[in-house]
Image (cartoon, grey):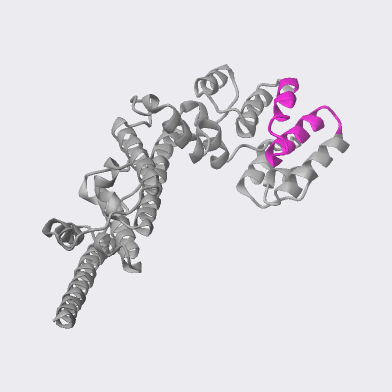
Amino acid sequence: MARSRLISVAYASLSERFLLTLLLAGLVVSLGGWQWANLAGAALRSPALNIGTYGGGWGGAGLGDLNLRPGPDSALLIALASQLDGDDSLARQTYTGALPDACALNNLGAISQARGDEAQAREQYRAALSARPDLSASAFNLGLNPGTPDSSFQRTYRPGQPRLCYPDQRSLTRAVTGDLSVTLRQALLHPAQVLTPAPGRSARLGWALLGAALLSALMALSLLLPRTRLTPAQARAPLTRVLALLLPGSGLMNSPWGGMLLLAWAAVLTALAPWSGLVTFPALPLLASGALQGGLIVTLAVIYILNAALLLTAEVRHYRHQRWKARADS
């Protein structure tokens, strides 16, 4: 603990350390979200999810290769594949793992209707529509005639047959990757896996994520350190002043301006990063282009000018305080 007092963070106040801890935690979540988006995008581009149907032996083998995460969304997808293959018994058994999902209830109603149990089928359709009033498949099966393109297709090309409910993009994403917490937990528990190149996984992004997580943990531990008082020479060292100018808000962390400027600076740089070519988002358009790009550059300049003005004001205030103190002592 005594040696830890020699590090620079020991000179920061508790509020400054707490704010930096929150910023680093936000960076960890952002990098984890980036990794999660890459993994989900690579998995959703799998032919098994884009061939047009989830049925057939080839489709079932493709779903098996995806290593779907156990849960209701995966159960819905696997059960739908079995139902499209004509194995209603296996589909009915697998759908129970997705209940009370409205999509699973609708498809169970289709199985009941195929078996001739109209009463149970209508009950399941009603339960599905009650759980999701916007579910057009259940509305169609109940004879409510929703005006959607899928319903028109069903009436024209599959008359008299119940309409099945297919998982939406959000459900598919949860089935192939889980949510963001799953990606973060795997990164922290299995760091070697994060650093291994794979479809949708970047080793550089993995290193950045693990580095940010380590810094966040160290900053959280620094909250336990007692604060070391700065001498006047340390508080106003030339290097400290230069860093305060280059990193807006870092020299004003004791005031509300510090956090505001630092967050605004980080947000603008994040939006401008793809335009600079340092990082790229293949699946997303440039966040800054055209007039927006020029506006962000002007905003960045305003942030630096405002930071410099506030630092200059603090220097003048300190100089006046020192003069007043010298006069009082004399």
Position of residue 103 measured from the top left corner of the image (x, y, whole percent):
68, 39
Quadrant assignment for the N terminus = top left
Position of residue 179 measured from the top left corner of the image (x, y, whole percent):
52, 39
Q: Does the stretch in magenta take in 30? A: no
In the rendered structure, the answer to whether residue 251 lies left or right of residue 267 reads left
In the rendered structure, the answer to whether residue 115 lies left or right of residue 34 reads right
Position of residue 174 measured from the top left corner of the image (x, y, whole percent):
55, 36
Residue 312 occupies quadrant:
bottom left
In the rendered structure, the answer to whether residue 278 lies left or right of residue 20 reads left
Q: Does the stretch in magenta take in 112? A: yes
Find the magenta span and give its range: 89-117
* Residue at the left extreme, as displayed: 238
Viewer-closest of 71 and 122 = 71
**Vertical relation: 95 (above or below) 272:** above
**Vertical relation: 85 (above or below) 295:** above
The secondary structure that dominates the magenta segment is helix
Quadrant assignment for the C terminus = bottom left
Viewer-closest of 324 and 316 = 324
